[in-house]
Structure formats: C-alpha cells, structure tokens
Image (cartoon, rainbow, N blue to C red):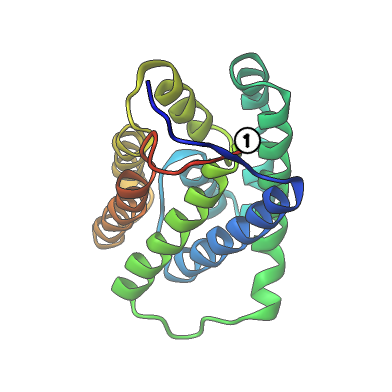
C-alpha cells in the first residue's frame, strides 16, 4: 500500500491549468495550421475537415466533440466532463483569437513539428493532471488508463499515428511524415511524464 500523500488542487489551480494548457495547445495547433500539418485524435479529424471544407478549425473541433460528452459523463463523471467541455470551448476560441495576436509568416516545418508537438503535449499534460481533456480520443485514452492501467500516451500514440496515416488521402506524403513525427513528439511528452503515481496532485 502506497504511503504517498496526495495534495488536492484548488479550483483556482484547475482554472489556471486549463487556461494555460489550452493556450499551449492552441499555439501548437496554429503552428501546424500554418505549415499544413496534421495531428491525431479528435483534433486530427478537425484538421482534416478544416482542410477539406474550409470551415474554421475551432468551429469544427467544437462540433465533432459533442458526441463524446455522453461517454465522459458515463465513465468519468460530471466534474471531468465539465472541465473537458470548458477546455474544448477554450481551445476552439483560442485557435480563432491567436492568429490576430501572433503571426507565423515563415516557420521551418521541422521546427513547427517538434516545437508544436512539444507545446501540445505539455498542454495535454497540464489538462490530464487536472482531470480534464480535449474530448474524443483523450476521453477514451484516460478511461482505458484508469480502468486497465494502459498508459494514455501509448494508446493515443497508436490512434494518432493511424489517423495521420489515413490523411494520405488529403495531404502530400512529406507533410504526413512531419505530422507523424509531431504525433510521436506529443505523445512522448505524455508517455514520459503521465505515469500513475508519479504526480501527487489531484483534482
């Protein structure tokens, strides 16, 4: 039996983590959008639909997450679902606002891949540690980790890489290769840092 003491997060700490976490992810997403890159999970589907339809990424991302809240309520509870809904809404808003605040006019593709993936992974880590997510595959990954002990980062890496590879129908292979590298970078951050028992804070 572990004698590790868990310190409960305050609501202020949860709010700060969700706001900053979604800003980090939005910055990474805007780097990807600037270079025509993709990622996995629900965000990856939103990228694809954005490139195909021309609708804004933020709007598409918000809409396609709606069906997953039922699973979140059933499996993870109302508190997690409320935090996740707020995170999705904030990210959708940030991705629309940030291009008016910061411009990426000439960004190296490899840098955008690695730095953007690192930013998004760090943002996800902040959300996960405060019992929030960005919906969709994140909800499934967290549920599987809590129920079966399979690390969220490993499951998400498999799903993310599969979605990015399916994107060959839309994006040229060079950008797909960079996107796979970004998915590995993002999930490496999670795999290394998001281990049961490593972080003693809780919400």
- The one nearer the camera, 163 or 156, is 156
Where residue 191 sits in the image (x, y, percent)? Answer: 31, 44
Residue 56 in view: no
| Side of 58 where 29 appears, left or right | left
Q: Does residue 147 sit above or below 176 in this rendering?
A: above
| Side of 67 where 41 appears, left or right | left
Where residue 51 sits in the image (x, y, percent)? Answer: 51, 54
Name the residue: 75% across, 52% down.
12
Quarter-of-image position of residue 171:
bottom left
State which quarter of the image contains the N terminus: top left
Q: Secondary structure at mark 1?
A: helix
Farthest-out residue, bottom: 106
> For mark 1, does the 10 Å Cα neighbourhood hold few (<14), some (14 to 19), or many (20 or more) residues?
some
Name the residue: 49% across, 35% down.
138
Residue, disc 1? 64
- The one nearer the camera, 176 or 83, is 83
- The one nearer the camera, 67 or 88, is 88
| Side of 121 where 57 appears, left or right | right
Farthest-out residue, front: 3
Name the residue: 30% across, 42% down.
161
Name the residue: 36% across, 40% down.
160
Residue 45 in view: yes
Q: Does residue 22 sit above or below 114 in this rendering?
A: above
Where residue 102 sits in the image (x, y, percent)? Answer: 62, 81
Where residue 44 sits in the image (x, y, percent)? Answer: 46, 45
State which quarter of the image contains the C terminus: top right
Tally of numbered discs: 1
């Amino acid at each position: 039996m572990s004698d590790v003491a868990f310190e409960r997060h305050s609501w202020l700490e949860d709010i700060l983590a969700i706001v900053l976490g979604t800003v980090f992810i939005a910055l990474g997403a805007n780097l990807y959008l600037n270079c025509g890159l993709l990622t996995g999970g629900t965000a990856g589907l939103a990228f694809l639909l954005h490139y195909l339809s021309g609708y804004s990424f933020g709007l598409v991302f918000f809409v396609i997450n709606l069906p997953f809240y039922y699973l979140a309520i059933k499996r993870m509870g109302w508190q997690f679902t409320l935090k996740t809904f707020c995170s999705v809404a904030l990210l959708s808003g940030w991705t629309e606002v940030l291009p008016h605040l910061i411009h990426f006019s000439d960004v190296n593709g490899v840098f955008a891949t690695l730095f953007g993936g690192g930013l998004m992974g760090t943002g996800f880590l902040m959300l996960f540690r405060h019992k929030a997510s960005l919906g969709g595959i994140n909800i499934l990954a967290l549920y599987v980790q809590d129920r079966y002990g399979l690390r969220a980062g490993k499951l998400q890496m498999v799903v993310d890489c599969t979605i990015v590879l399916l994107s060959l129908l839309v994006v040229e292979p060079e950008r797909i290769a960079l996107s796979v590298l970004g998915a590995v970078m993002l999930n490496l951050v999670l795999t290394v840092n998001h281990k049961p028992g490593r972080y003693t804070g809780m919400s």
